[in-house]
Amino acid sequence: MKAEHLQQVRPAFHDPALGSQAVFRAALNALSHPGRLNHMPRVTDLPSHGHGSAAVLLLTMVDSECEVWLSPALENTDAAAWLRFHTGCPWAESPDLARFLWVANGDALPALNTLAMGSDEYPDQSATLVIEVDAASEHGEQGTSAFSLRGPGIADMQSLSVRGLPQDFVE
Amino acid sequence: MFHAFDTSGLNKPMKRPDWMALLARAPLALLEQGLDKQSATEPSWLRRPETGLYMVLARAGGTGERFNLGEMTVTRCALRAGADVSGLVGVAYVLGRDHRQAQLAALADALLQDPAQREALNTKLLQPVRKHLAMLQTQRAARAAATKVDFFTVAREVDGIDEEDGA
């Protein structure tokens, strides 16, 4: 890391152990209840670029063995320097090599079918996509992509509407 | 342990790697003394002091295979001098487990990046460190010199007649 990048870096977790545990709990809740909205605890100083919740989630999940791909709006920003400094993550050359992808609000998604899928033996090697959107709600809204979700983690039916996703996100 | 750039040239400008190398080997007492007022304030941490191990690799004779010589305990930290966002960022890696030493070395690194403070810190902090390292080097050289053994070989006298007989 160059000195001028380091100069922009902000601190991370106020308390590394408790902070990362709180974020991990939030992520666990979110993944076990698809479609339910969760609030990310505010436990870190944040970079000026990128959404805070995405930044905190990646800070918690990523380590020095996780290749991360950043969308163009995040590349070479203080968010990149911040994530790199605090986690030691390497940058992925292209989206298909990444384990985690961080797509800033307004940036185009990489083609989803090119991302790492994992294998039957190692499904955990699939890519995790963190997308920033304009808004999300558990009730229908105008001008949003609306979903009705059923399946594991959902008792009956969960409705979710997201503003800021491309039209062809689910196909 | 000792490097050519430890001696300060009068004309050559001091670079960041030079002073960082000096600070990494500066004993705590000299750091406290050189930074007396500045060291009192709590810095804003980017990375609190953390102690870990580094594997030292070595190569015998410069041509042999690389091998693991052993692990070294290293403490590192990164901090921002002063409370506001514009403060300079300093980094330090020091041998051992002394968090305070790493903190002060990082603080000195941050302050030395400010041209306005560099000259004063150079006189107050880096010069004593240079002197201390030079003294260590002299002591070490003297200890080594005391064990020096001069080998010499007395030229053997060759008995020419015996050789002729043998032939």
Image: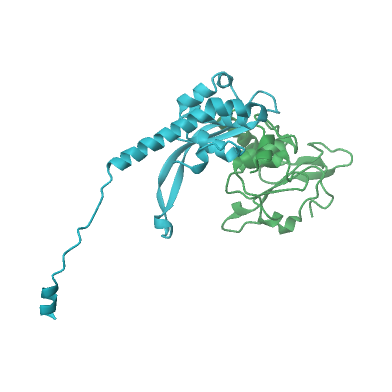
User: What is the quadrant of the C terminus of chain B in the image?
Assistant: bottom left
Query: How does the figure colour the protein chain or chains?
Result: by chain
Pick whichever, A101 or B135, lies toward us: B135
Pick whichever, A88 or B167, lies toward us: B167
Residue B7 x, y percent position in the rendering: 51, 37
Q: Residue furthest right?
A: A142
Residue A120 x, y percent position in the rendering: 59, 59
Q: Residue furthest bottom?
A: B167
Q: Is residue A5 left or right of residue B97?
A: right
Residue B84 x, y percent position in the rendering: 69, 24
Q: Name the tint of chain B in the rendering.
A: cyan
Pick whichever, B152 or A151, lies toward us: B152
Q: Is residue A154 visible?
A: no
Q: Residue at x 75, y 44 (%)?
A: A74
Pick whichever, A153 or A100, lies toward us: A100
The part of the image, by quadrant, that contains residue B118 is top right
User: What is the quadrant of the N terminus of chain B in the image?
Assistant: top left
Residue A51 x, y percent position in the rendering: 75, 37
Residue A123 against residue B92 in the figure, above or below: below
Q: Is residue B62 left or right of residue B90?
A: left
Q: Residue at x 32, y 42 (%)?
A: B144
Q: Is residue A112 visible?
A: yes
Q: Is residue A41 left or right of residue B57?
A: right
Q: Residue at x 66, y 30 (%)?
A: B115
- Chain letter corresponding to the colour green: A
